[in-house]
Image (tube, rainbow, N blue to C red):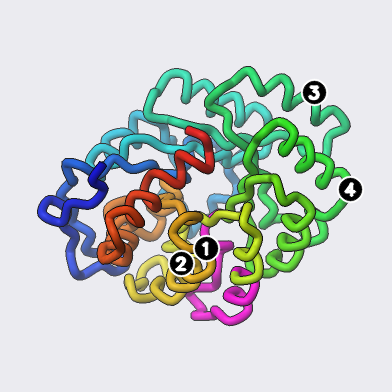
Amino acid sequence: MEIINKSNLKYSSQLEGGSGGERVAPNSLRGIDAHQHFWKYDAIKHSWIDDEMAGIRKDFLPQHLLPILLNNGIAGCVAVQADQTEAETNFLLSLASENEFIKGVVGWVDLRADNIQQRLEYYSQFKPLKGFRHILQGEDPSFMLQASFLNGIAQLTKHKYTYDILIYPKHLESVLHLVQQFPDQPFIVDHLAKPYIKAGLIDDWEKGMMALAKQPNVYCKVSGMVTEADYKQWKSTDFTPYVDVVVAAFGMDRLLFGSDWPVCEVAASYQQMMGIVYNYFSNFSQLEQEKFYRLNALKFYNL
């Protein structure tokens, strides 16, 4: 399978916030977007969408995403929870049942619940459900190390579910302690653990990511970068040092492409966002690109 054909894949060289990113869809890129969201906008449920992000205060559903994916040579996606309720999990599973291009779902369940085993047994009937996520970025770093949460992770391992790690750099030390306790649990870090790209801070984050990557069961999504930069003034070169770090840390066998659509649209169009990663990885080998855009997602999420 050919992933990148440079003769029919083109981006503007002026990739920066608010401009550029014109794209001609490739004929042969059949990638997997390993991280995106759907929602029917609700001001209370989605209160995390603040005034700076007002442009995404509206519905984002499969009919809105599919043409974007096709125009960018993406064959399928993994839909990730944006609300911490089982209703959210059920909503995404309903969408997946109606839309073949949604290849997997990362849902939410209360991992600290006394009946977590029963809830996971219930959800085992839904094949598109690949894993779960708790929004740890909103919790104290100690949250993930409490006994009830650790029990929830242990139950995920028993039921062969993945776990998406959504954190800030301040959580990296605790995450390392977490994953070291579960060497057989597949973990994946969302959005490079949200480094402080706008501020240009890298050293402490780099140390944390390098330590975390030594755990062979931990993967990383190259996603969500544009919303950690200056929404209006970012340049493609802003992201290079951070992608350099995760490539060195995780290698090309444990990195996945993700868009974080529609959240990315606060700072960049899907085309601009994809242009950043395309331009970075365009000189990598054909096999390395194939792993990044497709094969690693198929393997990690068992799509």
First along the sequence among labels 3 and 2 = 3
Q: Amino acid at mark 3?
A: Gln
Q: CA distance from mark 4 to mark 1?
A: 29 Å
The answer to which image quadrant residue 84 occupies is top right
Number of residues whose C-alpha sits closer than 10 Å to that of mark 3, classed few (under 14), some (14–19) or many (20 or more): few
Q: Which residue is mark 1?
A: 250
Residue found 33% across the figure and 43% down from its top:
31
Going from N to C along the chain, the mark reached first, 3 or 1, is 3
Q: Residue at x 41, y 54 (%)?
A: 264
For mark 2, does the 10 Å Cα neighbourhood hold few (<14), some (14 to 19), or many (20 or more) residues? some
Contact between labelled residues 2 and 1, with CB atoms less than 8 Å apart: yes
Q: Earlier in the sequence, mark 2 or mark 4?
A: 4
Does residue 258 lie above or below 110 as drawn? below
Residues in magenta, as a range: 190-209
Under mark 2, the amino acid is Val
Q: Residue at x 75, y 50 (%)?
A: 182
Pointer 2: what residue? Answer: 247
In screen coordinates, is 204 left or right of 1? right
Q: Which mark is residue 263?
A: none
Q: CA distance from mark 1 to mark 2?
A: 6 Å
Please give the label number shown on residue 147: 4
The amino acid on which the numbered mark 4 sits, given as a three-letter code, is: Ala
